[in-house]
Image: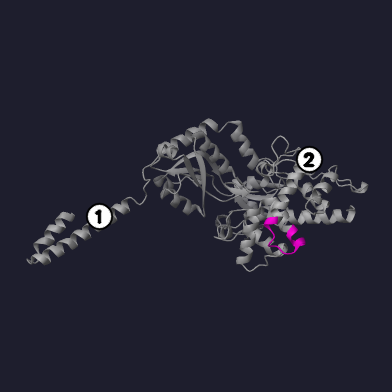
Amino acid sequence: MHSLFLLNTIEIMPRNKGHYLTTLLLFLAIIIGTSSCNLHSSNKNPEAGYDLDSIKSRGELRVLTLSSSTSYFIYKGEERGYEYELAKRLADDLGVELKIIVAHNMSQLTEMLLDSVGDLIAFDIPITGDTKTTLLHCGPERINAQVVVQSDKDPISDVVELVGKDVYVERGSKYEERINNLNKELGGGINIHCINRDTIVTEDLIEMVSKGEIPFTLADETLARRNRTYYNNIDIYLPVSFPQRSQWAVRNDTPLLAQAIDEWTARNKDTEEIKAISQRYFESSKRHSSSTILSIAQGRISEYDEIFKSEAAKIGWDWRLLASIAYHESRFDPSVISWAGARGIMQLMPATAAAFGLGMDSIALPAPNVEAAVKSIKSLENSLQRINDQSERLKFIIAAYNCGIGHVFDALALADKYGKNTQQWYGEVEEAMLMKGNPAYFNDEVCRFGYFGGRQTTTYVREVMSLYDYYCEKIPK
């Protein structure tokens, strides 16, 4: 086509040779430039057409996902999440390293996959006619529905019984859309309350149901199951929507990768390792027993008081504050292993313990466990010297001990951006920590560590400080 255009142009050119040559060179330059642009456009993605062999040659599986309590998050400085753990084992099976790439929303997930930013979406992508035209669904298949979250005491068993009841949902969420449609289907009568606050998300509403502060909310079944491991007094068994099939996804030009993922899933879905991962996130209780091991009447807190006194003195802390942290971490039970793998009376993560010279053979021993925990606390204190008041700094340290210093840094950044007092925890940075459960904020450029259910940490700080006050009242220093 370019040759025909050039020949036609030459026929109408003037006969002046100098002008002719100049014009000819100009048109050649235009044609070469146009061809270069087309070539560049067609090769916008230099990896187009790659498949499993290319991934293995690269030595890295790039996995796209979203930050959430079920897929991927950072906990005490370590990567966690159900999808993350499955993807890690898939990468190990393929003999490659795992690289996690976090998108901001579902639309961006698909865009990044189609642009070859990642190889695989490890997140529940609904299986629809539209997705099948551009994606290959593969991997673990799940059937999910929205459910009513309610108290397990005399729960309703039919959605018709929601008429006349108060149902609370996030404003602008899919749950608001579903409850409005259900209300229309039932002819009206459901009292719908749409919550529009930066620090309230669906998981907070589930906690409010557990505490009896609201009667009903809606959630995806997977999210509800995850939260029932924290709040075992909720009922999550009444569906309010049709079930939806979902799976992971790859681009439709990587069939060998899809096949490898399907084969890995088939081989592993019934193994004890995969069952254990599912149990950790969706079945095992995250709550400690409510029983206590206190001997306040005898002037003691626990059988480890002397260890607390010795180690707390090394950093100038009141030993009773250290004991308060230990109580909330383990109830002074050195055999406790958390869902995330934390161990001992101070619930040290293995990586944290190793960083302070404590191996797995001694991580659960009370004295070494407390000693390493105190070293960790000292490191956190050094990182939080920007908090000028020492008594106020304690709250920030306790928060970082619970969730990891990265999330506290994010909360400080959000607090600064939104005009909160960065020197005060209660009501200020505490509120910014709660914002980290909201995608509008944890996807903010000032946040580096993504999603975190901040209410867990804000409650932890208040409970530790309250118990510390109680110990100070009852137990001599």
Residue 216 lies, in percent from the top left, at 66, 54
Asked whether 231 falls inside the magenta stretch, the response is no
Residue 1 lies, in percent from the top left, at 18, 54
Residue at (21, 60) in percent of width and height:
29
- In this view, the residue in front, 308 or 109, is 308
Residue 383 lies, in percent from the top left, at 67, 56
Which mark is on residue 297? none
Asked whether 390 falls inside the magenta stretch, the response is yes
Q: Amino acid at mark 1?
A: Ser
Q: Earlier in the sequence, mark 1 or mark 2?
A: 1
Q: CA distance from mark 1 to mark 2?
A: 72 Å
Residue at (56, 44) in percent of width and height:
144
Q: Quadrant of residue 86?
A: top right
Dot 1 falls on a residue whose secondary structure is helix
Q: Is residue 33 left or right of residue 211?
A: left
Answer whether residue 54 is visible to the viewer in this image: yes
Mark 1 vs mark 2: in front:
2
**Chain part drawn in magenta:** 382-394
- In this view, the residue in front, 425 or 237, is 425
In the displayed image of the protein, which residue is found farthest to the bottom?
419
User: Which residue position is annotated with label 2?
Assistant: 366
Give the answer, above or below, for where 272 lies relative to 201.
above
Q: Amino acid at mark 2?
A: Pro
Which mark is on residue 35? 1
